[in-house]
Image (cartoon, helix red, strand yellow):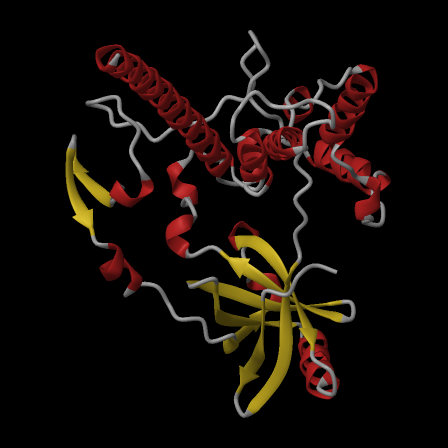
Amino acid sequence: MAQAIWKGQVSFGLLNVPVTLYSGEVRNDIKLRMLDSRNDARVRYERVNEETGDEVPWNEIVKAYEYDKDNYVKIDQDELKEFLTEANNNVELESFIDATDLDPRFYEKPYYLVPQKKFEKGYVLLRESLKQSGMIGIARVVIRTRNHLAAVIPYDDALILNILRFCEEVRALDNYNFPAGDVSDYRISDKELKMSMDLINSMKTEWDPEDYHDEYRKRLLEYVEQKVSKAKPKKSKKSDQPEPSSNVVDLQDLLRKSLEKNSKPKAPGKTSRKSNGDSDTGTKSGKTGSGKAASGARKSASGSKRATTGTARKQTKDNKADATAGTTSKRKTS
């Protein structure tokens, strides 16, 4: 079932019939996209400024009325809303006319009025009253903020709400040259008229909409399905490139493994040349969780090594100086 447009009521006089409004039209158009023949990429429309050639964002677009060539008056959107009719979900029957009096040119779009549960009695009463009287109801209705003229027509077990065109939307017959006058003015004999009527009667049949289909759509659909069966789908662009998230996970895994490898204790039997080698190794293993901390530990250990080496050299130099001084002193004494 189609999605309901609104729930409301059909009202005339003191009678109100709760109903649900559904669209009676089905759109079966086959959508054909526009592609660039050079690489089969989609072609899209852009909102372009005619003077600058730049694309215009939606928030910079306003509506206007062209009252003369290239002369406009801007229409404020808030002011435009004042002319829209607030939906009241009500089919207000204003009058009733003979069903044969409605000009077929005014029919536009059908909707279904479906009775709500427990309100079927009022619905059937209105439907049968229209059927037996041969009348249809003329009403005003609001659908999606737009005020429409409509006819409520009984059909089978249903009530049809058919949107009607306003008189301003229908071209007058006198705009065209239709042959007027009597049949005899066109030299049509009674015999010719009778033969034409006999032919029409011989082709008379019961109306069945299932006998008539959109042949163009049928042939086009068959053609498209045949093309699709032979087509070779292109691989999705996403499958050609690894997901960014997986790259992040791999990178984190590599970093973790690298840190674990660097934080492993040295194998026994291998003595470090560093004077403070044991403390240096302990510093690294204690800071495995941070690359910066490990780097800092290495710098600290390296600095400690340089300091220790420097001290040892100084002590050696001082000892040599003391030894030389002692030898000189003994020579003088002797």
Which residue lies most toward the bottom here? 14
Residue 238, percent across and down?
64, 26
Residue in the image at 76% along x and 27% along y: 221
Task: Please give the count of numbered marks on the rendered protein.
Answer: 0
- 112 w.r.t. 93: above or below: above
Q: Quadrant of residue 186?
A: top right
Q: Quadrant of residue 114?
A: bottom right
Q: Quadrant of the C terminus?
A: top left
Residue in the image at 45% along x and 71% along y: 87
Q: Quadrant of the N terminus?
A: bottom right
Image side of residue 118 versus residue 14, left or right: right
Image side of residue 69 versus residue 11, left or right: left
Residue 184, percent across and down?
57, 36
- 276 w.r.t. 322: above or below: below
Residue 206, percent across and down?
84, 50
Q: Quadrant of residue 72?
A: top left
**Closest to the observer: 81 or 301?**
301
Which residue lies most toward the top here? 38
Residue in the image at 71% along x and 74% along y: 131
**Closest to the observer: 7 or 55?**
55
Residue 292, percent across and down?
46, 35
Residue in the image at 58% along x and 87% along y: 16
- 24 w.r.t. 274: above or below: below
**Closest to the observer: 263 or 117?**
263
